[in-house]
């Protein structure tokens, strides 16, 4: 027969084991995660410069908003374009709140699978063709071609989306994602 000391020791051992098991279960179900979440901060883009080059010369479209979401509207400038011409285009994005200005275009190029420019055209602007792609063959839009039609006026809206669906149908509605910057440039085609 067991002695009362042995029985007490077994009961104490069972209690300690039960408490240890409960402590293990509670800590394993804890929501603490030692792996930090990767934070991809939204880029600050103060300036978008679009350079358009053709045999007729170079034209520049620029939007500069140095106070960001502040009270001042962006300063938008646009050179006139030549009718019935194909331009080779490139986009540069800057964060001019830093000195020297940070080139956000480099980050967009490095994360090309997570970014895409979209182009909306009206009036005498007739077509945009992507001239660059990400590692999966999907368009990015840092480099592109813009074709003008007959003399008149029009507008080009350039939107940079972060984490769009790729491939997509070339519209922001299908692509989804978050807008990093969107700007409309009114242009004269002569």
Image (tube, rainbow, N blue to C red):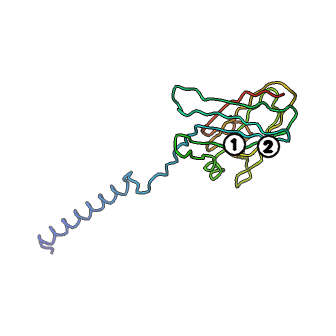
Q: Is residue 125 left or right of residue 100?
A: right
Q: Residue at x 70, y 45 (%)?
A: 142
**Residue found at the very far left of the displayed protein:** 4
* Residue indicated by mark 2: 88
Q: Position of residue 1 (x, y in %)?
A: 15, 75
Residue drawn at the location 79% of the way across and 43% of the way down:
88
Q: In 3D space, how far apart are the residues under numbered discs 1 and 2 (Cα atoms)? A: 11 Å
User: Does residue 126 sit above or below 136 in this rendering?
Assistant: above
Name the residue that disc number 1 marks.
Answer: 91
Residue nearest the observer in this picture, 97 or 155: 97
Q: Is residue 127 left or right of residue 96?
A: right
Label 2 secondary element: strand
The image shows residue 70, relative to residue 110, as above or below, that is above
Give the quarter of the figure containing the C terminus.
Answer: top right
Residue 139: image x %, image y %? 73, 47
Please report the residue visible at 86 percent of the width from the left and 36 percent of the height from the top: 85
Give whichever of 24, 147 is nearer the camera. 147
- On the image, the x and y values in percent for residue 104 come to 60, 46
């Amino acid at each position: 027969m067991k002695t009362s000391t042995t029985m007490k020791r077994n009961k104490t051992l069972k209690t300690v084991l039960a408490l240890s098991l409960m402590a293990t279960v509670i800590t394993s179900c804890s929501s603490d995660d030692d792996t930090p979440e990767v934070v991809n901060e939204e880029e600050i883009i103060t300036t978008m410069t679009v350079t358009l080059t053709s045999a007729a010369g170079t034209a520049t479209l620029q939007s500069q908003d140095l106070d960001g979401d502040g009270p001042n509207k962006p300063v938008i400038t646009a050179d006139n374009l030549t009718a019935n011409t194909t331009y080779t285009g490139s986009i540069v994005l800057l964060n001019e709140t830093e000195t020297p200005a940070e080139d956000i275009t480099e980050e967009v190029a490095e994360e090309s699978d997570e970014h895409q420019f979209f182009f909306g055209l009206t009036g005498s602007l007739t077509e945009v063709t992507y001239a660059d792609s990400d590692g999966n063959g999907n368009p990015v839009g840092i480099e592109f071609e813009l074709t003008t039609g007959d003399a008149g006026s029009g507008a080009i809206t350039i939107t940079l989306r972060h984490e769009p669906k790729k491939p997509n149908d070339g519209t922001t509605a299908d692509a989804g994602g978050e807008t990093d910057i969107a700007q409309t440039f009114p242009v004269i085609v002569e």
